[in-house]
Structures are given as structure tokens and as C-alpha cells.
Amino acid sequence: MITLETYFDYVILPILAISVMLVFIRLFKGPSVVDRVIALDLIITIGIGIITVYSIRSNQKVLLDVAIILALIAFLGTVAFAYYIEKQKDD
């Protein structure tokens, strides 16, 4: 019988780790600044997933608050960058 903890350890966390490595490649290689910003936003999103999995695994509800705050900061950063790109187009 597979437990939730075993599933987290052997399926979910390795998938998240592989995805972080692939996105880091896109972050360093990315041909444009927009690709790099999207990769950075995706790394933060994957980090939120890792924090959430660890929070569920260790039964620490405080970490979910950290994940929510990190998601809000990432969202504001992406909106600010989109606003900056839009202003660059107008000039």
C-alpha cells in the first residue's frame, strides 16, 4: 500500500526537482528577457509547490502562509514587468 508520504517522496518531489532544473536551463539560456522573466516566475511557482508539499508532509500550516505571500510577490513582479514591456512598446 502506497502512503501519501511515500507518494510525495518518490513521485511529487522528484518531478518538481526535475522541473526546477529544466527551468533553470531556460533562465540562463533564454534568448530574450521575456523568456527569462517567465522562467523566473515559473521557478517561484514551482518553489511554492515544493513549500506546499513540504508543509503537508511535515504538518506545518505556517508554511502555507509563506507560500501565499510568495505567490503574491511573484504575481506583482510579473504584472510590473508586463507594464514595463507595454510602456517600452509605446515609445
Image (spheres, rainbow, N blue to C red):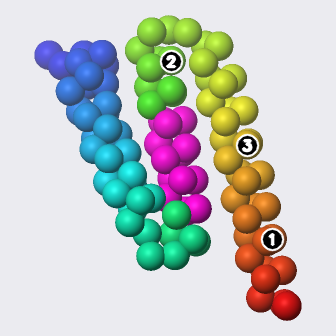
- At label 3, the amino acid type is Ile
How far, Cα to Cα, is label 2 from label 1?
33 Å
Labels 3 and 1: the sequence-earlier one: 3
Residue in the image at 76% along x and 61% along y: 79
- Residue 50: % across, % down: 45, 31
- The residue singled out by tag 1 in the image is 83
- Residue 82: % across, % down: 73, 70
Magenta stretch: includes residue 45:
yes
- Left or right of 57 on screen, residue 45: right
The residue lying furthest to the top in this view is: 59
Q: Which residue is at the front of the view, 16 or 36? A: 36
Q: Can you say which quadrant of the picture contains the C terminus?
A: bottom right
Comparing marks 2 and 1, which lies closer to the viewer?
Answer: 1
Judging from the image, what secondary structure is the residue with disc 1 in? helix
Q: Can you say which quadrant of the picture contains the N terminus?
A: top left
- The residue singled out by tag 2 in the image is 55
The residue lying furthest to the front in this view is: 28
Q: Which residue is at the front of the view, 21 or 57? A: 21
Judging from the image, what secondary structure is the residue with disc 3 in? helix
Assess whether mark 3 and mark 2 are in contact (beta carbons under 8 angstroms): no
Q: Is residue 71 above or below residue 84?
A: above
Residue 66 bears which disc, if any? none
Q: Is residue 28 above or below residue 31?
A: above
Residue in the image at 35% along x and 40% along y: 16
Q: Is residue 9 above or below residue 73?
A: above
Magenta stretch: includes residue 31:
no
Residue in the image at 41% along x and 59% along y: 28
- At label 1, the amino acid type is Tyr
- Residue 52: % across, % down: 51, 27
- The residue singled out by tag 3 in the image is 73
